[in-house]
Amino acid sequence: MSDPFAQQPLVYFFGQGRADGTSAMKDILGGKGAGLAEMTNLGISVPPGFTISAPVCQTYLETRSFPPGLRAQVERALQRLEAATGKEFGGDKNPLLMSVRSGAAVSMPGMMETILNLGLNDRTVEGLALRGNNPAFAWDCYRRFVQMFAAVVFGMPKSSFEVLLDEAKHAHGAAREIDLPLAALKTLVTRFKMLVADHVGEPFPEEPMEQLWGAIAAVFKSWNTRRAIDYRRLHDIPDSMGTAVSVVTMVFGNLGEQSGTGVVFSRNPSTGERQLYGEFLSNAQGEDVVSGARNPEPISALHTRLEGPYLELQRMASTLERHFRDVQDMEFTIEDGRLYMLQTRRAQRSGQAAFRIACEMVEEGSISEEEAVARIPPYALDQLLHPMIDPSATLDLLATGLPASPGAASGTVVFSADRAAELGGRGEAVILVRQETSPEDFHGMVASRAILTARGGMTSHAAVVARGMGKPCVAGAQDLDVDESLGVIRAHGREITAGEWITLDGSTGTVYGGQAKLLVPQMGEHYQRLMSWADRIRPMKIRVNADTPADAHRGRDFGAEGIGLCRTEHMFFEGDRLTAMREMIVAESKAEREVALAKLLPMQRRDFEGIFRAMEGFPVTIRLLDPPLHEFLPKDEAELVLLAGELGKPIEHLRRVVDALHEVNPMLGLRGCRLGIIYPEITAMQARAIFEAACTVAARKGRVMPEVMIPLVASVVEFRRQALLVRQVAEEVFQERQLTVPYLIGTMIELPRAALTADEIAREAQFFSFGTNDLTQTTWGLSRDDAGHFLPLYIESGIIEADPFQTLDQQGVGKLIQMACDLGRKTRADLKLGLCGEHGGDPASIAFCETVRMNYVSCSPYRVPIARLSAAQAALSARGTVDRTKATL
């Protein structure tokens, strides 16, 4: 078998390659490695280092061995690193220490592992201590290294080391680790190494080369940790991508008060404001900032402490933003007054910030309007639709912290990620409360409405992950004493226990007791401007699924251009309507049914009038009655007895009706057009209600455009019979009203046979609307209500890539849709094509609809903005104008 790596390098030294081409190497170098190489080529101060390519990761994970030639290439890179730094790896006097960092092509902040201070042992620590004659600094680095290596390589719980560290701090009255005396730090290292030996069964590795290969392997393995897999599922990142490993010369932010470390953004990632934004810690290493172990200072304070490095940081941030033409998220370390950049990447940002930044970068001439539209991930709109606390609400303030991620949420308190996942998976509203979150909490954060931490800053793990997911977060709420073991929060003499309600406002950093009233916010000017660009770009129309005038108004407020699905059955499920519907179902003759239908007619007509007015000037697609009749009848005997009394029918008759309507598989039973064929008077009543309502609105100078949709058609003969009846009723109403309104008759393609015979159906039908919910069920042979028991396992084990009810299955269902579109257009060139299932609000499914040239998609009201943006991005992608994959938060 040939070696897949024989013809390509496995290790790339920083700066290898051209500056204008390094960004294209993200698939090889990962985002972190590509950023470090690019900054090196730009002349920015970066510690020397090298990157092991991402393709090596998958080889290692599959074989648990490194490819031939990798060790030799790493050794050559180490020699080059020693020459560049004047240090020796494993040397006694001037040791070369390194960090080993992960980095995939797509940023996955905090999901994989990093090891700092690698290369320290009982000999090299003495050489490091000679630096600035600062042995406490050296032993603090050694203590950090042993703890981090043990956690990452050997999988030991960090808490085991934290207990020993807290004991030492308490014994010596030290507020911070760096305040511990030298003897205490040496003792900690000894105790840490003993802890490792007890756990592993052998001494802590002293040989630097053994440490290096152990770290490289552990970083590769971290690609498949639970949190990394969960993150990839959430963000649709392929498992095959793998992570690169960057080996970087250590620079030390914990050398003293002229040193420090931090994270900075070139613009505010929460608001989009054009100013340097971030945090730093003096006399610290990078792990201290992101872990939340110490509360950092705002980046503006660095200006006062170390003005020179601060001004240089400003210049570098501006340079990198101009070069990459996007907001940058940067990590830096200051070592004895000298600034080093350790990472730059496209910054994650809130939805609000994403719109503002995109618009302002267009104004600045940095990007085009098309690029601005392409850069907004559609799910950013979910954040803009997040609730806010009602300003008039009476609030019970518990604590204040940092406004780490905007939006407001209420939920019951949970103290563990597993509990959050359990309750959140049942649909319960929960808020995850922790001292500080770690990557292991990711699955619980996904399931929670919001996150609250007592420690950490604006760039802590909780803050970064929450912003990326669009969840509200309050971090660093120091007023709170979070006792996770007892399940209680203490604040100002009060106690909140697990299961009690609290409310967070991630925009202001406030925490309230109880369940506050929340309001949906209004869209801002940047949203309106960018969406106007999107609307100009997209040819595909966006409609709303709406069954009531209120839904229709809401959809139109969000920019809907018509109704793609009005489900008439939803109008019958309450009050007098339900009683009349039940009267119709249990009728013993056609005459009795028509009496009941006459009661329903004015109710349906009023509903349609309201919907037509709400959507005046836009098309309204109304689906005739679809569900099986048994869904309208009582489920238990007591309700059946009550109904018998209401309708004046013998209970025995009602039982016979219920028994007669029982079906083994109702989804494939008497429903849709089959109901209209068996009971044509139902179709006639609904058609009359539609056309009488249309005429009433049109008579008042309103523009109405009804589209009557016949559901569950499998044969053109079924469609023809129902369409003939609808046309007959339409003509009757037009003659009675002395008024004509234009209308279309079409069908919902939701059965494979309908797709396969679309050419025949198109001879009669004027439009197709793809009902992808049922089409997916009937194509896959899956029940959407029951498949939830095993679909997650199918996805997790790789049998299918995604839930076909959430994202359209393009290989199977998509082929049927493509076939139906092609066959239908061959028969009828002007055939209108749309999609009205839940997939109408899914970006990937909308992109597919663009490829088959659909006229519109239709979705729920709150998904309309997402569909508008997704349709524009799909159009840009189809034209090849802008790469839609660059959309990011």
Image (cartoon, helix red, strand yellow):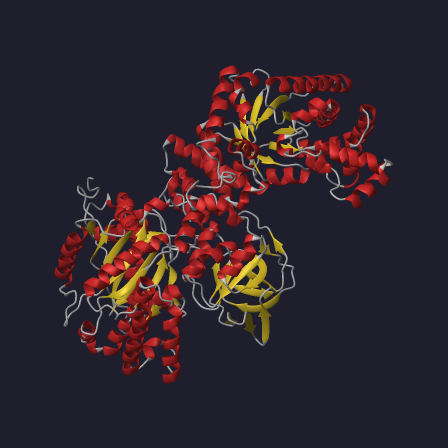
Left/right of residue 361 with respect to residue 777 in the rendered view: left
Q: Position of residue 378 (x, y in %)?
A: 47, 43
User: Quadrant location of residue 269?
Assistant: bottom left
Looking at the picture, tell me which residue is in the foreground, 190 or 168. Answer: 190
Given residues 378 and 597, the one toward you in this image is 597
Q: Nearer the viewer, residue 606 or 769?
A: 769
Residue 284 in which image quadrant: bottom left
Asked if residue 706 shows in the view, the reply is yes
Is 859 drawn above or below residue 486 in the view shown? above
Residue 317: x and y, percent? Answer: 31, 55
Task: Give coordinates of residue 717: x percent, y percent.
Answer: 62, 17
Q: Is residue 580 visible?
A: no
Q: Is 207 drawn above or below residue 566 in the view shown?
A: below
Residue beneath the point at 49% across and 19% down: 823
Say which quadrant the N terminus sits in: top left
- Residue 16 coordinates in the image, percent (x, y): 18, 49
